Image: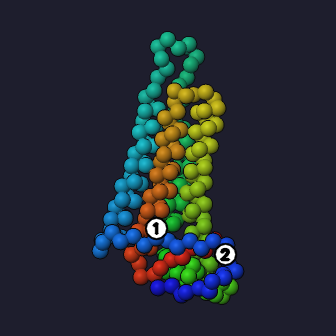
Amino acid sequence: MSVPRAPYDPRGVFRINLPHFEIGPRARAVGTYISGTLFTLSFFLMIDAATVSKYSRPPPDAPYDTVPVHVAFVDWIPAICSTLGFLVTSLLDKSHLHAALSGDSWGTDGPAAWRARVVLFIGVALMAGGLAGSLTVLILKYIVNGYTEYIYYGAANVGMNAGIMLSGIILWVSQSGSDEYEYQLTV
């Protein structure tokens, strides 16, 4: 249960309440399974694109100097960032955030609350950076260079990073919705 706030709160412009979904007594388990399934399907999408690119050959009527585009390490860097961000946010102890996000004392939070805020920011920034990086790879490597026949590789990269980010959101909401705490994010 959170502490009620005054109508005017000078700490933030917007006040966003996280929804509390009533799935049933097993809401935490259901959300965790959905998140894990989405995470696995996201990785499967990128591994499928890497496998297809490994065995791609130029068409038989292409000039002899035509080389097909393959998934390289550059394509995996956004995936690594998103995965690290997912791990950081999912391993964060949410009890430290309770005092940071719902308390009325903005300047008197303890060091654990500040560390939790910094870790949460780093995790979300890694996931957002991974998604932005995959869009950058899609645009610069596949669209700008005119490799439209290989655009599936870039789209799979974007799909993987978006899936990992959505998986992290589902896991966060399902674990915080069934806790004894009620989180209120203030921007």
Mark nearer the viewer, 1 or 2 = 2
The crowding category of the residue bearing disc 1, from other C-alpha atoms within 10 Å (few below 14, some 14 to 19, many at least 20), is many
Up the image or down, 37 lies above or below 18; here it is above
Residue furthest left as drawn = 25
Earlier residue among tags 1 and 2: 2
Tell me where residue 103 appears, x and y as whole percent.
58, 85
Circles 1 and 2, Cβ within 8 Å, touching? The answer is no
User: Where is mark 2, residue-wise?
Assistant: 12
Q: Secondary structure at mark 2?
A: loop
**Colour mapping:** rainbow
Q: Residue 57's mark?
A: none
Q: Is residue 153 left or right of residue 11?
A: left
Residue at 43% from the left image edge and 62% from the top image edge: 170
Tell me where residue 72 appears, x and y as whole percent.
54, 38
Q: Secondary structure at mark 1?
A: helix
Up the image or down, 146 lies above or below 183; here it is above
Quarter of the figure with residue 135: top right
Residue at 33% from the left image edge and 69% from the top image edge: 23
The crowding category of the residue bearing disc 2, from other C-alpha atoms within 10 Å (few below 14, some 14 to 19, many at least 20), is few
Badge 1 amino acid: Trp
Q: Is residue 100 left or right of residue 167?
A: right
Tell me where residue 76 appears, x and y as whole percent.
53, 45
Residue at 46% from the left image edge and 70% from the top image edge: 19
Badge 2 amino acid: Gly
Q: Is residue 47 visible?
A: yes
Tell me where residue 63 appears, x and y as whole percent.
56, 13
Residue furthest front as drawn = 7
Q: Is residue 110 visible?
A: no
User: Where is mark 1, residue-wise?
Assistant: 172
Judge by depth and name the residue closer to the eye, 124 or 115.
124
Q: CA distance from mark 1 to mark 2?
A: 22 Å
The quadrant the C terminus occupies is bottom right
